[in-house]
Image (cartoon, rainbow, N blue to C red):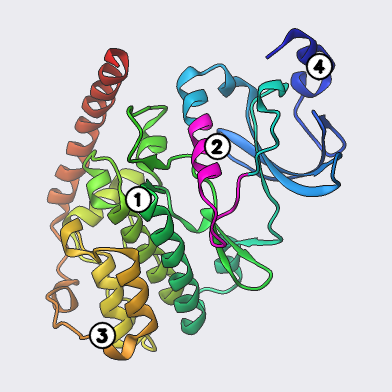
Amino acid sequence: MSSSASLSQGPSLMNELRAGSRLDHYLIDALVARSGMASIFRATDERTQRTVAIKVPHLEMESDPIFYERFKREETIGLQLQHPGVMRVLADGESAERSRLYIVMEWVPGQLLRHVLQQQKPMPIERAIALSAQICDSLDYIHAHGIAHRDLKPENIMIDEHDHAKLIDFGLAASEAARRITFTSLSQTMGTPDYISPEQVKGKRGDARSDIYALGVMLYEMVSGHVPFQGSNALATMNDRLVNAPVPPTVHNPSISPQLQEVIYRALERDPAARYASAREFAWDLRHLDEVGVTDRTELHDWRHRRPSWLRRGGFYLLLLLIPVVVFGLLIYVARH
């Protein structure tokens, strides 16, 4: 960052961006979303009068070199992806001259899937199937490019005005070409408790099969109105998926067909090797439910037999013990590389 740029943007840098602020040649219109790491604004490119979305990390995060690397990787990944089901990152050609760190993206009129579910939960089954199939198509595309999203959840799916789904927020995405594993915090490495895959709970790096699992959780939630695993806190929720089968979604919504329930179970297999081998296979079954064979699964009969509480507590405390070990190992890895 040049000193002249810092001075010219002094008011914006010293204070929070708000409607009417300028960020280089972008005029901030409104705050759209805010997380612990960054904020997203709707803005106008004053050169072209085009409406865009700008993701701006909080000032205190910009000084973190690991966060900086991850944020730049998110932009690099975004620039590689050109698919109607993925929010596009825009290259403005002046990143070296920016007054601060940010990512410019296309503006998509619509609302997050989370907001849709708050208004309509459970969602009509046909709509849930159509949206999930679209998300599968987008996952198939990014997986073919060696990218795993690793943080799929309703907050990271945008539903546009034509009911088309778009993947957003690749802040935790992993590329097969990446040579390092970076670390900022446990949640930033692992994902979100309700949607995290069992292998990520165990400390493994998420991959394409983890995305399939997360979409299975979202499909379950869309058609049943509930998430498949719950707990009194984040670790208890994650532990529940390691020791118990989900309540069959038909218990919550009897209008779910046996074929759709089978598709959900295939996506939620605890063993990654037993899940759909690809998002394309997942999409095929969603679009051809009449051809899906239904398995007489033990989960359909044994789901009421939850593992004893002392075993769940044991798993919970084991997770607590594993967290510092995983964190320490990652820090050593980063330090050595």
Q: How many marks?
A: 4
Give the alpha-carbon distance from disc 2 to disc 4, as whole Å. Answer: 25 Å
**256 or 280: nearer the eye?**
280
Residue 334: x %, y % from top left: 32, 19
Q: Nearer the viewer, mark 4 or mark 1?
A: 4
Residue 21: x %, y % from top left: 84, 32
Amino acid type, mark 3: Val
Disc 1 target residue:
232
Marked residue nearer the N-terminal end (2 or 3): 2
Amino acid type, mark 4: Gly
**196 or 304: nearer the eye?**
196
Circles 4 and 1, Cβ within 8 Å, touching? The answer is no
Q: Quadrant of the C terminus?
A: top left
Disc 3 target residue:
292
Q: Which residues are magenta?
A: 71-89
Q: Secondary structure at mark 3?
A: loop
Q: Secondary structure at mark 2?
A: helix
Q: Secondary structure at mark 4?
A: helix
Disc 4 target residue:
10
Q: Residues within 10 Å of mark 2 (few under 14, many from 20)?
A: many
Residue 111: x %, y % from top left: 65, 61
- Left or right position of 287 against 308: right
Numbered circle sitting on residue 75: 2
Q: Residues within 10 Å of mark 3 (few under 14, many from 20)?
A: some
Marked residue nearer the N-terminal end (3 or 1): 1
Residue 89 visible in rendering = yes
Give the alpha-carbon distance from disc 2 to disc 1, as whole Å. Answer: 36 Å
